[in-house]
Image (spheres, rainbow, N blue to C red):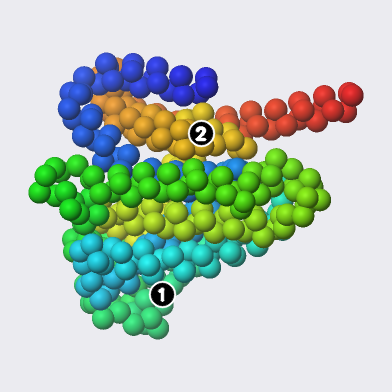
Amino acid sequence: MMVPIVFLVLCLGGFFLSGLPVNFLFNEMVFRLSRNLILVLSLIIPVISGMGLNFGIVLGAMAGQIGLIIIMNYNIGGIGGLFLALLLSTPVAIFFGYLVGKVLNKAKGKEMITSMILGFFANGIYQLVFIVLAGRIIPFSNPNMLMSTGTGLRNTIDLNIVRKSFDGFIFSGITSYPIFTFIITILLFVGLYFFLKTKLGQEMRAVGQSMHIASVSGIDVDRTRIISIIISTVLAAWGQIIYLQNMGTLNTYNNHEQVGLFAVASLLIGGASVDKASWKEAFIGTFLFHLLFIISPLAGQNLMGNAQIGEYFRVFIAYGVIGVALLLHAWEKNKAITQLSDI
């Protein structure tokens, strides 16, 4: 509980230093929460299953971007286009999640660093496909998506035909706030809550507590862990699509790169750890992390006379929170092993 309290104090101090109006801050937070919560939610099930923080959600983000690239190639816009992107990205995310799960089952006890390396490896393949093969071997009917040479996707793709299609669906004539996106997010949070009460959800908890005891109890540990990663990857794909439709542009080669880092940092700031997480920590952490993102540049400028200080502070927080959390986990684990050996 100490971590979210510390960050709340930092946010309050930064808010007073920044001098930002409350209305501006409220509007920014509403949109940031709507587009980031599902990405943070995607981390919860692997943590519960004892697999730690799944940096491999980067592959889910890639799957979501593949879905968007397909609909943009065929100029399928609006709410129908986004639902089609969700539909197309799901089997890709399931396939990616299955492969990641198989690899992580071979690296038990080292899942976090393995999932991070898998993200880097997959990013190399992703860039190979869309820089070298797109337009040359993979046909694209929309020339506006390709570079001037006719090979490789452009660095930035305008998502104008699907921009805010979820955010403004049904309620666009009533309010500018992303009500429909929040409805989807709430449904997923509620769905996760009830899923964890099912037999499979309880098996995931059992595997997270002790793989040995779970195996003796008749639970297929490897299968359960793979399902956990698949669900996480699919949620990340959906979350990335919702994030990008709100932003309105797709940075083809780097939009997915920081997804794992920022989602993990958000969850940890909420008070989660590598072996304990819930929807409450996901919500609190996302709120505090992005509040700090909004206020830190202006607070840094007013305090130090340089807005860049705030930018450095944001990056420091993102990496620092993860580093401290992993150090604390390692310390607690070693302490528990020492106590057991003394007994």
Mark 2 to mark 1: distance in Å? 37 Å
Q: Identify the image quadrant of the C terminus.
A: top right
Front residue of this view, candidates 4 and 133:
4
The disc at residue 132 is 1
Q: Is residue 40 left or right of residue 14?
A: right
Which residue shows up at 36% across the image and 44% down it?
Answer: 186
Give the camera-side residue of 310 and 98: 98
Residue type at numbered disc 2: Leu
Q: Residue furthest left?
A: 173
Residue at 47%, 58% in the rendered image: 234
* Percent coordinates x, y for residue 38 in the rendering: 40, 47
Q: Nearer the viewer, mark 2 or mark 1?
A: 2
- Amino acid found under the numbered disc labelled 1: Val
x and y percentages locating residue 73 in the rendered image: 27, 74
Q: Identify which residue, 202 or 301, lies in the foreground.
A: 202
Q: Residue at position x 80%, y 30% from top?
A: 337
On the image, the x and y values in percent for residue 214 come to: 75, 48
Report which residue position mark 2 lands on. 268
Residue 129 % position (x, y): 44, 72
Secondary element under disc 2, as helix, strand or loop, is helix
Q: Residues within 10 Å of mark 2 (few under 14, many from 20)?
A: many
The crowding category of the residue bearing disc 1, from other C-alpha atoms within 10 Å (few below 14, some 14 to 19, many at least 20), is some
Q: Viewed as shown, does residue 239 lie left or right of 249?
A: right
The answer to which image quadrant residue 294 occupies is top left
In primary-sequence order, the first of circles 2 and 1 is 1
| Residue 112 in view | no
